[in-house]
Image: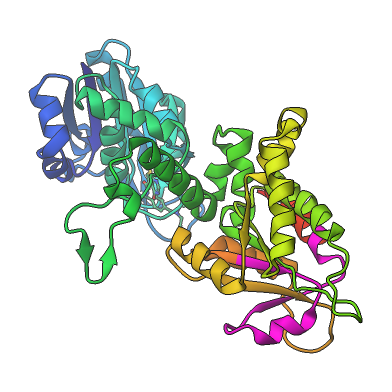
Amino acid sequence: MLQFTVITIFPEMFASPLGHSILKKAQEKGLISVRTVDLRDYATDRHRTTDDSPYGGGQGMVMKPEPLVAAIEDARKKLDNPRVVLLAPQGRLFTQEQAARLAQEKELVLICGRYEGIDERVKGFVDEELSIGDYTLSGGEPAAVVVIDAVTRLIPGVLGNEKSSQEESFADGLLEYPHYTRPEEFRGMKVPEVLLSGDHDKVRSWRRQMSLELTRRRRPDLFHKAPLAAEERGSLAAGASRLCMALLHYPVYDKNGQVVTTAVTNMDIHDIARSARTYGVPRFYVVTPVKALQKLALKILSHWEQGYGSEYNQTRKEALAVVRLKDTLDDVMLDVEREYGSKPKLVVTSARPGGKRTSFLELRDMLIKSDQPFLLLLGTATTCWSRLTAEPIIITSPCARRRLFFWIACWENKT
Ligand code: 9D3
């Protein structure tokens, strides 16, 4: 049983919030009790005054110390060993962690300030000061309701067992994944396929991924503090989980019309796939309509995935798991769209002067703020960009592949 005592000049403000739902039930079950104390009962003059004008001038009023301290002392006398909390804008921030701490107490006295503030000399009579956030309230009453609500939810028996364990998920420090209920389609918006699949493992990993991405984008502060696997953190670097790459391997012929040097493919696949894996880029497409090159790429892939190379080098095997072979860029676009639900925004590199350039920093910003997948096209033939149907984002080229990975790595460390 946690006993709340609330000192306020507006006791009536608490009737409705305490008279509904969880807080009502918690009182009925005898898990908490809330007593409101009218501060005016502790005023000594005929008008029951609780405020006065500030010394030193200035506008507004200040809460007088005598009634407040009398009310606090009376509460301490009536209770056993209460923790006395002043709700004030200059208090420590009230968080889930603070709620868990207060939920351990047997008796809490909450003091609601009003006016511009309270006389500083009252502070020596309270145990701590709490604020519920950086915005201005008209008084401490709404803050006291917030504290009572958040603390009460953590008392065993208030929520069903199954729900209280969910509450723990706030303890993993992430925002929650998106929820859906019937109908399957609402105003053209469909419930994500995976939630209808019945595959519980897939559902769990989808929800985890959504939680991670949302937290990364909307609450980088939480994301930074969250206890994540190194892999999870990496896979979300600057929205890397939505940044796919494609290496466009246009056939290169010599004067006789023969395909020349395919050894580059080997290098590129290993090199880029490994960097992709390291920085959490989920897909690396190797695009070539030339069957001979596809065959070679397949040979390389299967060697590292199944051949003696797979035991010889585990990281390389993992790296190659992100590689996909495709005939054309259109096939890649379709594959990305199927995976993410929308067409990717294309990013190309160019060394040619002119045209609007996007800086790495701007690109990073776009990645973080957007919900769309991005597809970074790598290739040697600049001419191929002109054949693109959609307007691409152009970034400056020299050593762009390397620099891009370098930047992705830096972004991760920045958050
Ligand atoms: C403009 C100067 N304000 C101080 C930051 C004066 C002031 C504004 C509002 C003094 C008191 C109040 C009333 N607010 C509370 O008592 C309060 C509060 C809040 O305003 N925001 C967040 N948490 C809390 S807890 C109590």
Q: Residue at x 17, y 55 (%)?
A: 182
Q: Residue at x 47, y 52 (%)?
A: 214
Image coordinates of residue 47 in percent, x first then y, are 18, 46
Q: Residue at x 61, y 41 (%)?
A: 233
Up-down: is 121 above or below 323? above
Residue 235 in sight: yes
Span highlighted in magenta in the image: 375-402
Q: Is residue 386 magenta?
A: yes
Work out whether residue 154 or residue 283 is closer to the camera in this orientation and state it.
283
Image check: 246 left or right of 69?
Answer: right
Q: Residue at x 64, y 79 (%)?
A: 392
Instruction: Name the quadrant containing residue 105.
Output: top left
Q: Quadrant of the N terminus?
A: top left
Image coordinates of residue 95 in percent, x first then y, are 43, 36
Work out whether residue 221 or residue 215 is closer to the camera in this orientation and state it.
215
Work out whether residue 359 or residue 117 is closer to the camera in this orientation and state it.
359
Image check: 217 left or right of 358?
Answer: left
Up-down: is 61 above or below 251? above
Image coordinates of residue 393 in percent, x first then y, are 66, 77
Judging from the image, the colouring scheme is rainbow
Instruction: Name the quadrant containing residue 100.
Output: top left
Up-down: is 239 above or below 304? below
Image coordinates of residue 246 in percent, x first then y, are 67, 64
Work out whether residue 307 or residue 143 is closer to the camera in this orientation and state it.
307
Residue 71 in sight: no
